[in-house]
Amino acid sequence: MSPASGPSPEVPASGAPAEAREALAEARALLADFPVVDGHNDLPWALRQHAGYDLDRLDVAADQTGRLHTDLPRLRSGGVGAQFWSVYVRSDMAGDDAVSATLEQIDCVDRLLARHPADLAPALTADDMEAARAAGRIASLKGAEGGHSINNSLATLRALYTLGVRYMTLTHNDNIAWADSATDEPGVGGLSAFGREVVREMNRLGMLVDLSHVAATTMRDALDTSEAPVIFSHSSARAVCDHPRNIPDDVLERLPANGGVAMATFVPKFVLPAAVEWTHRADENMRAHGLHHLDTSAQAMAVHAAFEESHPRPTATAATVADHLDHMREVAGIAHVGIGGDFDGTAFTPSDLADVAGYPNLIAELLTRRWSRADIARLTWQNAVRVLRDAESVARAANRPPSLATLASLDD
Amino acid sequence: MADLQHLPYADTAAFGEPDEPPPAEAPTPAAFDLERARVLLAAQLVVDGHNTLGQQLDHTHWQDLLYGSATLDTDLPRIQAGGVGAQFWSLHTAADTAPDVVSATLDRIDAVTTLIASVPEVLRLVTDADQMAEARDCGRIASILGPVAGAALADSLGTLRAYHALGVRSVTVAGAHWTATGLTAFGESALREMNRLGVLVDLSGATEETMDRALSIAAAPVILSRSAARALTDHPDNVTDAVLRRLRANRGVCMVSFAPDQVRHADQPASLWDVADHVEHVRALAGPESVGLAGSYGTASDAPHTIGLEDASCYPNLIAELLHRDWSEADIAALTWGNAARVMREAQSPPTAG
């Protein structure tokens, strides 16, 4: 462990009320026993964009504050015990380009794990996660972000599973042929017949169905179809902040029956109502400069900075995220909440959750809101591990041959 | 030793009849040579370099392959009767040049690995030379995934590594645009990465320029998974004498194809005598340590086949012919198993791999 010099200001700095200081100390103690399983981190894409996957150029063993939200020292000080590394590729990629780029993302994670064996433990199962925790290593899993990564091919889905991918978000920001995205116009109206077959095949394999990013219609169709618990790898509550990336209450209400877990995200433009409007205008500005609105290159960040100069950015905090967790807990239940920060996948972060060192601030906030130690253990570690274990059980029980369905055979 | 008898029909010869009428002198090996060939093969099974059954799997159920297929030249009883102990399963697709070649290749990997998993009593997926020998010793046909088409790398070494992680152990370089003239800089880095990973570089079908460049930079033995001798039959997939001579120094292996177009003399129907001629030519130029076999089966039984080698059960006929030509048992053992197994081993621990 190295000195965490991340910019996450610890809310109760010296001189803060004793209660807050105690809460932070207790949060750290809790995280030592039940570290965070984070549902979504885009470090691989950041390494692709900023370093062309050259792990020497951007060495996560060193402090990368200012360049990345994520590095090993800050993961350690943030109390992270398991990370789903996203093997995201942009949703304007399609066909083989998306598949090949996804394989490169997987390769990046594998190389990262091979490079840092003392800190990062490859994990494929719930047992692997527990073993990593016992050994003091960060269990490292892979999640694909968007069905475009499988190019309408269940064989490609199976290849991703074989390569270690343990969840797939059904869509990213754009619709695909068999599923509707939350941030696109209605297409097939949720999941198509082939989309439902994708969900069943994921159930058979033991790959978690991730419903972040998908349209509410897709969420409902997936819940109707899935034999296994689903996850939301990085989504918060729509009732608290009305953004399509968040989860409506009627869907949260179904999680107890399904057994799934909704992992609250920190992205200000999804969790803070004032930031939703601000982001809308900032995105327009990016597009006016001919840039993709999710671009985080130096040039894009400069355009962002100029916009921010004239339009002060509303700031989210750990309390904003805690508001979502309070609501999600109330609607879905304590057994169905988790955390999915989306670090390195978003330009902006809450002020006291600025990077992966920030989780203790969120836990301290929840402690001050009278969350019990047992509640927090479920939020950080137990629920997510249980969900993967349950998905494994469903896969073992499925006992059916690989699906040979194609998009053409089911949807035409 | 491998139990060749534990399946029904294991002794059954060809199911299909070749379209071409047999020539006046159909090659019928002497019973004595055939018996010796079978004995030899029982001790040193065949490592076969090329089978395209993977392309047939969408419309072939594994049970047909397990119990015998009348429509294909390959099924498991006949592979076993042929004395095959290890098989490279080609992952080339009908879409090798199409925009979706990566997905199509993953689809073939899935189909072939699903087949292998469906018949664990016959096939076993292997990824190195030790596993090859172990599978053989357990009476299973060691199944090696490869080659994938060079174009299926999609110009991405990460994609190459993903194929490796999925078990693929050979890549055809021919046809990838980075082999258009010799090898581009990317082509060279792709070959070096294959060497580093222990993925065999398959030069069959490549231009002589590409073969020359590949042999110059190779840090491991290469293979030609399905090439006969260009000096005997002028076919683009065949290999020139100059390359065969270089193969000796590289310690690679040229696995002689049985495909009729690649072995026929002039306009004559191709027969196993022609294949024997090619095998002898390759041995003469590349040396007895650099010659192997590639049935090039995995097609419809009514597709053109070489007379005397109509299906995957026919290897003993060829071995009998080579015995008739006074091949030593040591050379035959090298031809069938030894050379390919050695190349697999050396490619996975090359002296200069980084």
Image: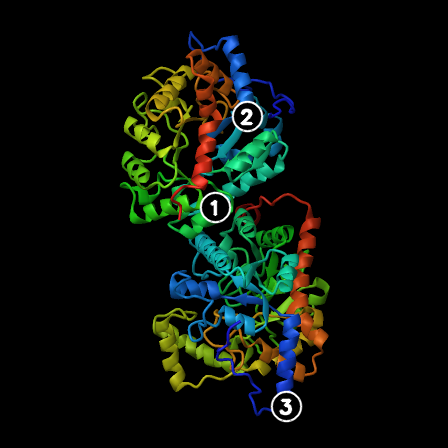
Distance from Cα at disc 3 to Cα at disc 2: 78 Å
Residue denoted by label 3:
A18
Amino acid type of the residue tagged 2 in the rendering: Ile
Q: Position of residue A319 (x, y in %)?
A: 59, 83
Counting from the top left corner in percent of width and height, residue B328 is at: 44, 16
Residue corresponding to mark 1: B164
User: Would you identify the image quadrant in which residue A336 lies?
Assistant: bottom right
Disc 3 residue type? Ala
Disc 1 to disc 3, C-alpha distance? 56 Å
Q: Does A83 sit above or below residue A355?
A: above
Query: With B3 as the anchor, is B174 left or right in this view?
Result: left
Is residue A168 toward the left or the right of residue B193 in the image?
Answer: right
Image coordinates of residue A291 in percent, x first then y, are 37, 70
Say left or right for B99 vs A387. Answer: left
Report the residue at 62% width, 21% height from top: B9
Circle 1 SS class: helix
Chain letter, disc 2 residue: B
Name the residue beneath numbered marker 2.
Answer: B79
Q: Name the amino acid type tagged 1.
A: His
Q: Residue at x 55, y 59 (%)?
A: A142
Is residue B43 visible in the rendered image? The answer is yes
* Foreground disc of the pair 1, 3: 3
